[in-house]
Amino acid sequence: MSGSSFLDYQGPFRAAVDIILASASPRRQALLTSLGISFQVIPALFKEPAPVTGQSPEDYALSLARYKALEVADKKPAALVIAADTIVVLEGTIMGKPCSDAHALEMLKKLSGNTHRVITGVHIKSPVQKTDRSFFCQTLVEMVPASDDILEEYVRTGEPADKAGAYAIQGLGGFLIRSVNGSYTNVVGFPLAEVWTALLEINALRLSGEKPL
């Protein structure tokens, strides 16, 4: 979807600047579209590095988001770039995307019946707004205990393959979730309230009823 454009919808905001989302994730694209703004999609292509020894999960998520933003900003220096990266953390262990079905099943077995953290790092870079800011959002998610047979059937659906922690709360994997403490959209992969608040603070958004400057 590199270079795809998303036009204005009926959300409460409109873009006041050229905005690029540095993500191929349809979930992030849908959430950003819900604001009502137009934006372009140019996914970052860099290979995500492993965490540095001693690096906190929060710093790791922020560093990945920053790498993505800087890569795309180099290609489009006049635009505002939004990048995000989501990780799942269980008892201090960072879980990224599974590399196989067996790996996905292993992750889900560890998460089953436990509470984990979902952390999304966000980086917004815009030379026009003189902005280069990072922030993260954290949500606690409790999973119900599930048998190996149930988890194996879920893995067979194919949904866990490209998801941090090997599940999608907004998809078929919603049946595994007992409770969410914090931002739901953060668990989906894009903390919407925090993003629009940051964009509004730097005058990158305007209300849909306002006339452009």
Image (cartoon, rainbow, N blue to C red):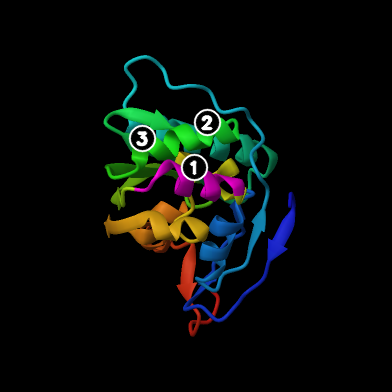
* Residue 205 covered by magenta stretch: no
Find disc 1 in the rendering and name its residue.
166
Q: Which of the two discs, 1 and 3, labels the residue nearer the N terminus?
A: 3
What x and y, as percent, mark residue 174?
43, 59
Query: Which quarter of the rendered picture does the C terminus lie within?
Result: bottom right
Q: Which is more toward the observer, 165 or 111?
A: 111
Checking the image for residue 103, the label placed there is 2
Rendered view: 31 above or below 107? below
Which residue lies most toward the top here? 53
Residue where numbered disc 3 is placed = 110
- Callout 2: SS: helix
Q: Is residue 120 visible?
A: yes
Q: Residue at x 73, y 52 (%)?
A: 1
The magenta segment is 146-156
Above or below for 47 versus 154: above
Q: Is residue 12 left or right of residue 162?
A: left
Q: Amino acid at mark 1?
A: Ala
